Structure formats: structure tokens, C-alpha cells
Amino acid sequence: MTPEHLTNFSKMCEEAIGIANKIDLPEFSFDKIAICGVGGSGSVGDLAADLLRYDSAMEVVVVKSYRLPAHIDENTLVFCVSYSGNTEETLRAFAEAHKRNCKIISVTSGGKLAEWSKKLNLPVILIPSGYQPRDAVPYMFLPILICLQEFGLKNFEEDLQESVDVTKKIELKPLDELAEKIKNSDVAIYGSEEFAGVIRRFKNEFNENAKITVKYDAFPELNHNEINGYERNGKQTSVILLRDKDEGDEIKVRIETTKEIFKDYIHSVHEIWPVGSSKLAKIVSYVYMASYLTAKIAELVGINRERVVFVDRLKVELKNKLNSVGKLEKNLF
Ligand code: F6R
């Protein structure tokens, strides 16, 4: 059965675009962008970096920890993304960005992030609550693009429309078959560096939905180190290659050659191809497929994909030990 967030995926994308279009943005000028967030919310930075890295001169810094890099200053547009709005790493990055006079826009469904942004009179994109953070990626990712469009970085209109359309065209049968084939094996996810963020998103979805650890890496770098690991222990591993019709000859030949070599060392090789022609549509289709595939595996092996026992337990224990958010709040106000 297709999970609810996926049956509503294209509607979610349309709604996300609608929410962002209503935001009254300040007139920010900036020379670089930082996107802060962890976990499901952190995927947003990875995906934005994939989208813009080779296509825009604007630097995109992805921050997945407490501290901001030294060069993040008052000329940086900082997106603080936390679905719950209560994640300590992102709140700490928010507080530091505020201290450095960065231009801040928060994306959240509520929590402290919404509360602090309002108190400090900073723009906040409020998205619907009630989802698992990782399932709400369209609500967090697409509004950031609308903001960047408003600030004149790039016009995403056509690509956004294509992204909404492609999610209706994704063929699910090959993903059902793949889920059946790999449901009990070790998994590795590899693809071109152009999709490094998507590769990581696949890995995260395997972790959080299918509850397994996976290997992940990008071509060409993995050809220089990771593949050597298979000399000793690859026989249980199913490799998923994230392909792209526009990957370019160097990457294409590398992947094809690696595939041939893999045959002697690993359990099986599989490929997933994105749908669409724009990079954005490809990214969005990959996000959909990663979610679908890993939810399907969870269903086949009979686990509850929504529960994230470790994450929840860790957050409670850290709160008790550190009370970081309480301390930050005290310093901010
Ligand atoms: C759970 C999930 C997690 C959270 C992460 C950060 O579904 O996706 O990876 O995203 O623990 O929490 P938020 O997104 O609320 O900042």
C-alpha cells in the first residue's frame, strides 16, 4: 500500500508552492546562502546544494551541526529548517546566525523556531504539522526555492511545475520488484557526485523507513577507495546505482565499467533512473522513489516505518543531560 504522504505527494508540492508564494519577504541582499538543519529537515540543504552547485555562482553552505562556519556573516542568507522547530542543533545555528546579523528565514511547523522567529520579528515559513519530518520534505524544500526565486537567484517556475507533474508519472512496479529483491540484503547506494545530496537522502530513507544501515558514496571518488572494500566483503551487498540520462560520458563509462567489475564481487546491482528533464524534477522524483522504495521494504519485512525509536530516545536523554534549548533561550531573550 502506498503511504499517505506519497499518495498526496504532488498535492503537497503544490501546497508548499502556495504557502511560499504568500510569504512577504524582506528585501534581503546577500552573497552566499547557508541552509541549516539535520535529519529529514537537513535533507533540504543537501537537495538544494545538488540543485544549485553546478548551476549557480551563489555558494550554498549546508550546515548539519551546532556551529556555523567562520565565513557565515551578515551577508549570508541563512535558512533555518526544522520541521518540529525544537531541534537543538538547528536552534543553536539560528541563535548564532542571529548574533552574526545574518539574514534569517526559518522553515518550520512550529516549536521554538517559530516562537523565536516571531519574537525577533524574523520571517518564518509556517508549514503544516502532523507529518514525520522526513515525509514533509516538499513542504520544506520547495518554499526555499520560491524565496530564492523572489530574491532573483533563478526562475524556477517551469521546473517547479515539471516537478509536480513528474511525481504523478513515476512507475511503481519496478520499485515494488526491487524492494522484493533487496528486502533482506545489505545495501549500498552510489551515484554521480552531481546527486550527492540525493544519494544521502536515499541513505537516510533506508535508515529511517527500512531501519537498516547502508553504505553510500559518489562517483568518481568511490572509484578511488570505496570499491576496494568489496575485495573482502561484498557478497551480501545489493548495490543501487542512481543513474541519470544526462550524467555525461566520463561518469557514464565509469559507472558502466564499475558495474562490470562489481559482478564478480557483490550480490546484485540495480539501477534507478529519475523522471523529468530539469534537475529539479529529477531530484523531486528521486525523493519520491527513495521514500516509496524504503516504505515498501518496511511493509514487506513487517516493520512500522514511522517509528524512530532511537531518535526519539536520544532527544529526550540529551534534553535531560544538556538542556541546550533552555540555555539558548535564556541567552537570546
Ligand atoms: C524523523 C526525521 C528526523 C528529524 C530530525 C530533526 O522523521 O526525519 O530525521 O528530521 O530528528 O528533527 P526536525 O526535522 O524536527 O528538526
Image (cartoon, grey):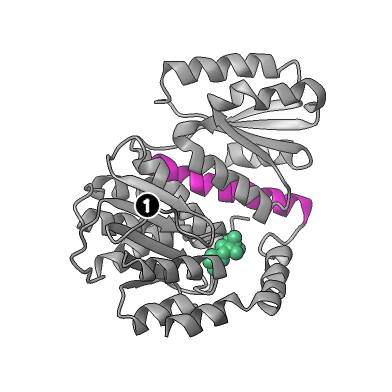
In the image, taking residue 101 as reference, residue 153 lies left or right, namely left
What residue span does the magenta drawing correspond to? Answer: 281-302
Q: Quadrant of the C terminus?
A: bottom left
Q: Is residue 194 above or below residue 133?
A: above
- The amino acid type, in three-letter code, at marker 1 is His
Q: Residue 279 in the image: x percent, y percent?
A: 36, 38
Magenta stretch encompasses residue 126:
no
The residue beneath circle 1 is 71
Q: Quadrant of residue 94?
A: bottom left
Q: Is residue 273 above or below residue 252?
A: below
Q: Quadrant of the N terminus?
A: bottom right
Q: Quadrant of residue 181?
A: top right
In the image, taking residue 157 as reference, residue 143 lies left or right, namely right
Quadrant location of ligand 1? bottom right
The secondary element bearing badge 1 is classed as loop
Identify which residue, 71 or 300, lies in the foreground.
71
